[in-house]
Image (cartoon, grey):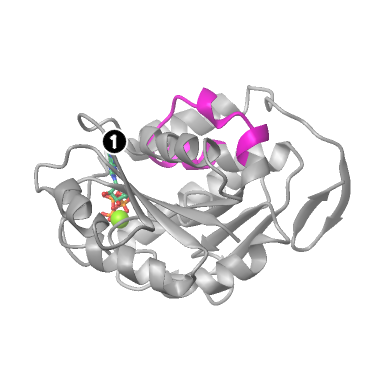
Amino acid sequence: MHALVVLPSYNEAENVLPLSADVLSRDPGLEVLVVDDNSPDGTSDLVAEAQREEPRLHLLRRPGKLGLGSAYLAGFRYALDRDYDHILTMDCDYSHHPSYLPSILAEANAFDLVIGSRYVPGGGIANWPKRRRMLSHFANFYTRLLLRVPVRDCTAGFRCYSREVLEVIRPFEIRASGYSFLEEMVWRVHHAGFSIREIPIVFEDRRHGISKIDPSEIWRAAAHVLRTTFRRPPVRRPVVRSDADGVRRS
Ligand SMILES: Nc1nc2c(ncn2[C@@H]2O[C@H](COP(=O)(O)OP(=O)(O)OP(=O)(O)O)[C@@H](O)[C@H]2O)c(=O)[nH]1
Ligand SMILES: [Mg+2]
């Protein structure tokens, strides 16, 4: 396996080096790409310095804060222009713990998209207030129902895509950012007939730094999901078999 882990970062100076070192230690086939939007706290300078000692650490510096969705897309473009066979995404704040990487990678050859999921048995959230948990549960219920996707955690950012998925589903058309980006990706992957597997993770609140998610993003995401129900999936493939784990294609 030759896989790229995309870490979008904005003001993650306290997290970025320990996290990327931890990721790289989990499998020799992994490389890391930090996509940093000119963080005022100097995140990208730290990465540039660490790169001198670590050839598996890469950096994409962008001129300003361009949003999470576009950071994922920049990571996908970087990976597709090179020879990675799998592309992973993780938050750069330790909410997605690298200790789950081996179990995600173990499923990645059998499934086109593997999601580190809070909402399958064994998964959970360590330290979120009740209100935030309820909101997230509702957002996922709403998305699953409206977009007709067999996925419990549609807003999870801990993912592993096969190269073929990203080549086929045309992610570069997506204009939405934040949660809506993640939901639209699940919709495209599922309705294109690719297989999806969720494995349980316990999500932890960020260790350092502050959240960059604007609370109004929740309403934007809800409206985006509603609009998406009126759209046709851009790519459709014949589905040959369904099972409890997801839908497989020929
Ligand atoms: N490159 C880039 N990264 C971003 C941007 N906005 C957020 N991020 C990163 O995306 C990841 C998720 O953002 P968070 O602020 O942690 O959002 P969240 O995980 O939904 O919220 P918290 O639970 O509060 O952590 C983190 O690694 C951020 O540093 C952005 O505009 N550009
Ligand atoms: Mg976070």
Q: Of residues 197 and 149, which is closer to you in this image?
A: 197
Q: Single out the residue that lies furthest toward the left.
A: 41
At 43% from the left and 40% from the top, the residue drawn is 75
Q: Is mark 1 on a helix, strand or loop?
A: helix
Q: Single out the residue that lies furthest toward the right.
A: 240
> Which of the image's four quarters has the N terminus?
bottom right
Q: Quadrant of ligand 2?
A: bottom left
At 39% from the left and 55% from the top, the residue drawn is 32
196 w.r.t. 129: above or below: above
The image shows residue 20 at horizontal and vertical percentages of 32, 63
Point out the stretch of residues depicted in magenta.
Answer: 166-184
Please tell me in which quadrant of the rendered image residue 19 appears.
bottom left
How many other residues sit within 10 Å of disc 1, few (<14), some (14-19) or many (≥20)? few
At label 1, which amino acid type do we have?
A: Ser
The image shows residue 214 at horizontal and vertical percentages of 25, 40
Q: Of residues 145 and 85, which is closer to you in this image?
A: 85
The image shows residue 202 at horizontal and vertical percentages of 43, 72
At 56% from the left and 49% from the top, the residue drawn is 84
Please tell me in which quadrant of the rendered image residue 189 appears.
top right
Q: Name the residue under label 1.
A: 216
Q: Does the magenta stretch include residue 202?
A: no
Q: Can residue 97 be seen in this view?
A: no
